[in-house]
Amino acid sequence: MFSGNVQKIFDEIMSDKENEKFTKAGIKPLFSAPENARVMIVGQAPGIKAQEAGKYWFDKSGDRLREWMGVDEKTFYESDIFAIVPMDFYYPGKGKSGDLPPRKDFAAKWHPKILKELSKVDLIILIGQYAQKYYLGDKEKSNLTETVKAYNEYLPKYLPIVHPSPRNMIWLKKNPWFEEDVIPILKNKIKEYLK
């Protein structure tokens, strides 16, 4: 499933006490880190559908993300271009207004180890506030809209985007510049990596 060192990290995650309830339930951490990956996608955490299927971005949000990137399912899942490294590798549960946030210290514990194995990654797509806060730190703007609007400041390494969830339709309607300006840049960058 994974190459040498990434398999070791996977095994460590499975045996970590903080993930014990998932491991005991037979739930595996959901991430992907092919050594030839050029693009790393950092989202929040798998949704319940993704976790049950054992397949990341396996829902309507994933459909829209692939549409934004200009790739089909086969390319997304079977090429070794994409690393999928969410802020938590397990579904965090339901909250009052959607899924709960990813666990606070999860990314700090596991992302640096995985990033060491992803030496060819040129672009990190930061989906949503949790990924942006972690990776951009004090370079993040006052809110998600302002951070995404300032995308040029973070390129070529990072591209902050809004979550492709159907819940964000109102945001997308209020901010047409996102699909007019940001999505074409995302599509072009992905096209370059797929050449």
Image: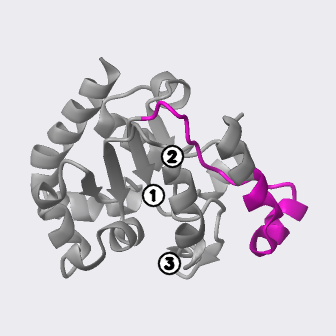
Picture layout, residue 60 above or below residue 14 = above
Q: Which residue is mark 2?
A: 84
**Which element type, helix, strand or loop, lies under badge 2?**
strand
Image quadrant holding the C terminus, namely: top left
Extreme residue toward the right, this view: 24
Q: Which residues are magenta?
A: 11-37
Percent of width and height locating residue 90: 66, 62
Q: Which residue is mark 1?
A: 43
Residue designated by label 3: 97
Indicate which disc, 1 or 3, sits on the residue closer to the N terminus.
1
Depth check, front residue: 47 or 147 = 147
Confirm or deny contact between disc 2 and disc 1 (CB under 8 A).
yes
Amino acid on which disc 2 is placed? Ile
Residue visible at 53% across and 34% down in the picture = 35
Give the distance between the C-alpha atoms of the residues marked 2 and 3, in whole angstroms: 25 Å
Instruction: Say which of marks 1 and 3 sits in front.
Output: 1
